[in-house]
């Protein structure tokens, strides 16, 4: 069942989204060669808790950290630890915050130092696909029309859409209906209505689309070891379009 949020609920979700966006801003400033993913996790948790909120991911299905930190060929759910970032790496940071019982969720992929042209193109295309989808979020639009728009941008660039993972509704639960794939046929799926809140998140591989999960039962990597990117915003459907709840100034698209 897809739950439409009231204006009072959206106010809580705006605050959760602000906290997530500000956490991304702090981590963007901290990402540099030599920093560990654990250090980034500590920065995130400290800030989220300072805002009268809690990390959505910590303890979720026993996930041990406050952020997901996925490097290079790691797509999603990377566990922060002692790994130090190197010049030229890319890192996907996925952040969730719960405020007054409501969640915000956003992922962004960042370059570390000077990255290759190919890596930069991957980031650019994945971000572009996200905003291509968001541009279609409005009342009465069919959900899979958004999925199709995302897929078109990715595949036109010669990259692959990951199919095992998708976006989702969000609210008092971190993952709610509907599921939002990053591929599909236009004109299909449920119609959007004002008050729906969606976490839309393209996940893109440079190489083949296939992925697998490592022995830690969390970290998802590409089968062919190609690099990958992940971008995500939480958005609310409004009367005439959508409101991005997790956008900071650095992420204006």
Image (tube, rainbow, N blue to C red):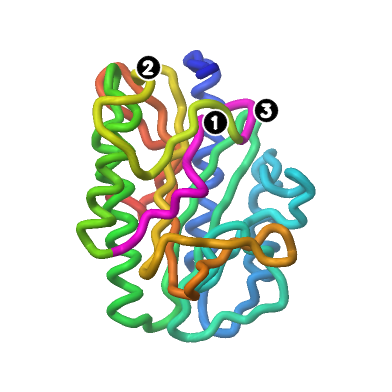
Q: Which residue is mark 2?
A: 194
Query: Reading the chain from its start, which is encountered first: label 3 or label 2?
Result: 3
Label 1 or label 3, whichever comes before in sequence order: 3
The answer to whether residue 169 is magenta is yes
* Left or right: 14, with 253 as reference point: right
Mark 2, other Cα within 10 Å: few <14 / some 14–19 / many ≥20? some
Magenta part of the chain: 159-174
- The quarter of the image holding the N terminus is top right
Residue identified by numbered label 1: 170
Q: Of helix, strand and loop, which one carries label 2?
A: loop
Question: Residue 55 at x, y = what percent?
Answer: 68, 46
Instruction: Identify the disc placed on residue 101.
Output: 3
Q: Is 225 in front, or is 35? A: 225
Cα separation, mark 2 vs mark 1, equals: 14 Å
Most common SS among magenta residues: loop
Residue 155's place in the image compared with 54, above or below, is: below
């Amino acid at each position: 069942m897809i739950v439409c949020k009231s204006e009072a609920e959206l106010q809580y979700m705006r605050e959760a989204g602000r906290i997530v966006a500000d956490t991304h801003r702090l981590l963007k400033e901290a990402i540099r060669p030599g920093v560990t993913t654990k250090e980034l996790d500590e920065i995130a948790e400290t800030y989220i808790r300072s805002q009268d909120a809690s990390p959505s991911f910590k303890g979720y299905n026993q996930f041990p950290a406050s952020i997901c930190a996925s490097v290079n060929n790691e797509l999603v759910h990377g566990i922060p630890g002692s790994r130090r970032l190197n010049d030229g790496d890319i890192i996907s940071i996925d952040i969730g915050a719960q405020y007054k019982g409501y969640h915000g969720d956003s992922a962004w992929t960042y370059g570390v130092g000077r990255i290759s042209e190919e890596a930069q193109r991957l980031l650019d295309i994945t971000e572009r696909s996200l905003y291509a989808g968001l541009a279609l979020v409005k009342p009465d639009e069919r959900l899979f029309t958004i999925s199709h728009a995302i897929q078109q941008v990715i595949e036109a660039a010669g990259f692959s859409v990951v199919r095992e993972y998708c976006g989702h509704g969000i609210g008092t639960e971190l993952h709610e209906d509907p599921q939002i794939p990053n591929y599909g046929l236009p004109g299909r799926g449920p119609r959007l209505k004002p008050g729906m809140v969606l976490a839309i998140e393209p996940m893109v591989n440079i190489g083949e689309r296939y992925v697998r999960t490592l022995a830690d039962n969390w970290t998802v990597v590409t089968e062919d070891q190609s690099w990958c990117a992940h971008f995500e915003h939480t958005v609310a459907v409004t009367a005439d379009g959508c409101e991005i709840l997790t956008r900071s100034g650095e992420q204006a698209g």
